[in-house]
Image (cartoon, helix red, strand yellow):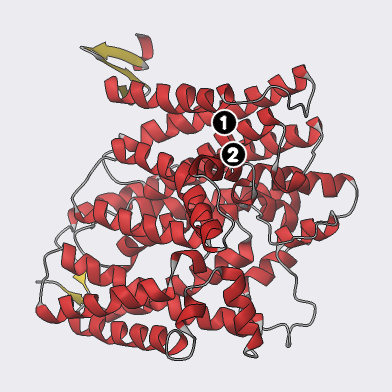
Amino acid sequence: MAHGYAHCRGTEMRVRGVTFGPSQFLMLISLAVIIPGALLLSIDQNFRLYSGAEKFALQLGLWLLTSFATLRLIRLSGDLGLPFMAMAFYVFIYVWCGVIPLYQISVGLLPWRILPSFANMAVCIVIIAASIAAFEVGYRPDRKARLAAQGRDAGADRVFAITETRLFLFSAIAIAFAAYFGPLTTPISTLMSDRATSLNEAIELGLTRGTRLVQTTLMRIPIFITLLANLWFLRARRISLPLLLLIAVQIPLFTLVNFPIAVSRAWLGGVVLSFYFLWLVTSNVRTMGIQTFAIVLGMFVMYPLAHYARSSALNTPRTLSESIFSTYTEGSFDVAAMTAALFIATDRQEFEISWGEQLLAALFFWVPRSIWDDKPVGTGASIGTALDFEFTNLSAPLWIEGYANFGWIGVIVFLFLLGKVSRPIDGADRIDALDFRTFLKVFLPGTMFILMRGDLITAFTVIGPAVVFAWLLLSPRFVLRSR
């Protein structure tokens, strides 16, 4: 074909640099046709939220988002490399902004009983599409980035590796934090309780929410970062008896202070994905292929399974199928609904752009309210309050945060910067060495779902301390060049 846009060879076809073989076509049909189609076929057609034409238009818009995300995932999964950041972004788009809202619109049931107008939902689709475009522009490698990559390739023998002594020191500090703020000062029954019960018991002990947040951060994040680093050493076959003993101590303590029903599902998912990405990196995998499909399916079942386990712990059990399908229309998947809710509140003139105040609250999340009297609450909570919701622990995806801070310009800038930051992380090529940038390649993609789902204050309380601790552990200032 002219211009080299497409050509065929055997059973494969190449279109704009993407090779479509049997596995790629299977992935395309599964993600763009079978999965959304299966959800639509399971619908009770008695549900009505929009007129027939409106419903069809919204379904078409959401399916186009789903299909574009599918094509990008196919392209990324075939790249020679491990573009985890971009893949996590498009898995989020596919699940939270494509298939799940398509299902919600079709059954006429959005989370939090939000009833957006057709115009609200249409703007929701537009803002998501604009966010994707901004991310793509930011993610595109420029000439300087390509030259830098060539320079890294030319100096591939310059590999930095942290010393085992330093890793042991930081691991000891992490274990001390986890033990002190965990089982030494907190009843084990509390550590293994659901989140609400755990927080209520902490408040009964005289702790404020802010104090408890600091304690849980010190309890969970350092041990997570050092456990990842230790497993990286182990996977790289730097095996020693002291390292094995250290990991043997860390794993049960880490599990106790990050007990699955006691942590948020977003954090639990980030932890699982980080371990999975670590396995991929240290297994010398160079293309994602079937792993991409596994991650997508994992997102569909991980949140429902976590909800199922939590509801069983609270003695409000559901069948597994009930838990899965009911979770699709509940708070775990409220991104599209909350995006529409932003414009409902804006239309009613009950929500105003903060001009950076919400961003400052995220950057300075560690400042207590006793010092900052008028410190803003999270953006999701602000929208919930504006709409008189009784429950305000709501999501605020990154485009909502951009809009809430600086309007449409904020949407473009926030997502552009996300793409700009994601590109060099995905381009980290020295995955056989443990340094700060390649560590971010394993850790940050798992937290992409926390950042994208929001709100920004919640995301920064997790990502900020983890990045700082990882930098202190792995900064080139503190590592030795390997021989």
Residue at disc 1, secondary structure: helix
Q: Residue at (14%, 82%) from the top-left corner?
A: 242
Q: Is residue 470 visible?
A: no
Q: How far apart are labels 2 and 1 at the CA level?
A: 7 Å
Above or below, 354 against 329 in this view is below
Is the residue under label 1 in contact with that under label 2 (CB below 8 Å)?
yes
Q: Quadrant of the N terminus?
A: top left
Q: Which mark is residue 23?
A: none
In the image: residue 186, left or right of residue 382: left
Q: Residues within 10 Å of mark 2 (few under 14, many from 20)?
A: many
Q: Residue at (45%, 49%) from the top-left corner?
A: 302
Residue marked by disc 2: 97
Identify the amino acid type marked 1.
Leu
Residue marked by disc 1: 65
Q: Residue at (37%, 79%) from the top-left corner?
A: 472
Identify the amino acid type marked 2.
Cys
Residue at disc 2, secondary structure: helix
Marked residue nearer the N-terminal end (2 or 1): 1
